[in-house]
Amino acid sequence: MTERTIVLASRNAKKTREVAEILAPYGFVVVPVTQFPHVPDVEEDGMTFAENAAKKAREVAMALQQWVIGEDSGLRVDALNGAPGIYSARYSGHGATDEANNAKLMTELLDVADEKRGAGYICSIALSNPAGEIRLAVEGTCRGRILRAPRGAGGFGYDPYFLIPEYHRTFGELSATVKHRLSHRARAFSIFIPQLMRLSNEFGKSV
């Protein structure tokens, strides 16, 4: 299998590792944008996950003159009218951490009954060519329920609180192998990868 390198417009090391693990069996090596210190941060000011994913892909691709994957994902909680949504990574404000975001989520859901704590993870992926043209855009979702206490040390973000009912496990408890089949990101990439493979002859092996 020919090895291909592609840039991921993300500064999240755990997300980069997860995407790299998903794409590795298909011969792709994922390089995070952090390897290019001259590339400025992209302001995620879109109104949807899809808009943010496309903006990240487009701006980084034009800055690097390379093919780039943009990804935006987050948690939508039914009882909170879809919050934290596109603000998932910065839910607790400036300097947000996973711990602070989860603490805020637990406070917001404190009086919400277990049967009303339904939620869904969403992942949008976009692929831009070096000219900043979006060539692919897909979205995947995964439904679950928010627990009152964390379970498991795996994953990142809200994963230890996000229960997959049919597996009786949180994303924090599931192995990477299982998560890479079930998660919103895995489902989005299952749509994205066949289309990426068809396009991959348009870009070279290097960044």
Image (cartoon, rainbow, N blue to C red):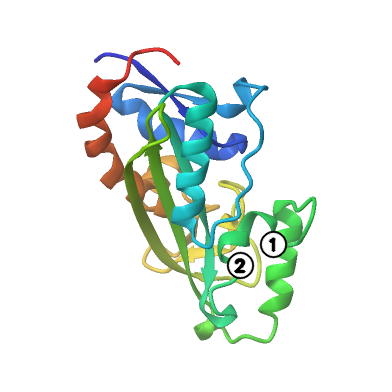
Q: Residue at x 63, y 61 (%)?
A: 87
Q: Is residue 151 visible?
A: no
Mark 1 crowd level (few <14, some 14–19, many ≥20, 10 Å Cα): many
Q: Which mark is residue 84?
A: 2
Q: Is residue 87 visible?
A: yes
Q: Residue at x 55, y 52 (%)?
A: 172
> Residue 198 versus residue 188: which sits nearer the camera?
198
Q: Which mark is residue 168?
A: none
Height in image: 84 above or below 62?
below
Height in image: 151 above or below 144?
above
Mark 2 crowd level (few <14, some 14–19, many ≥20, 10 Å Cα): some
Where's the C terminus, which quadrant?
Answer: top left
Residue extending furthest toward the right: 95
Whether the residues at callouts 1 and 2 have beta carbons within 8 Å, the answer is yes
Q: Residue at x 75, y 62 (%)?
A: 92
Quarter of the figure with residue 91: bottom right
Height in image: 148 above or below 207?
below
Q: Which residue in the structure is indicated by mark 1? A: 91
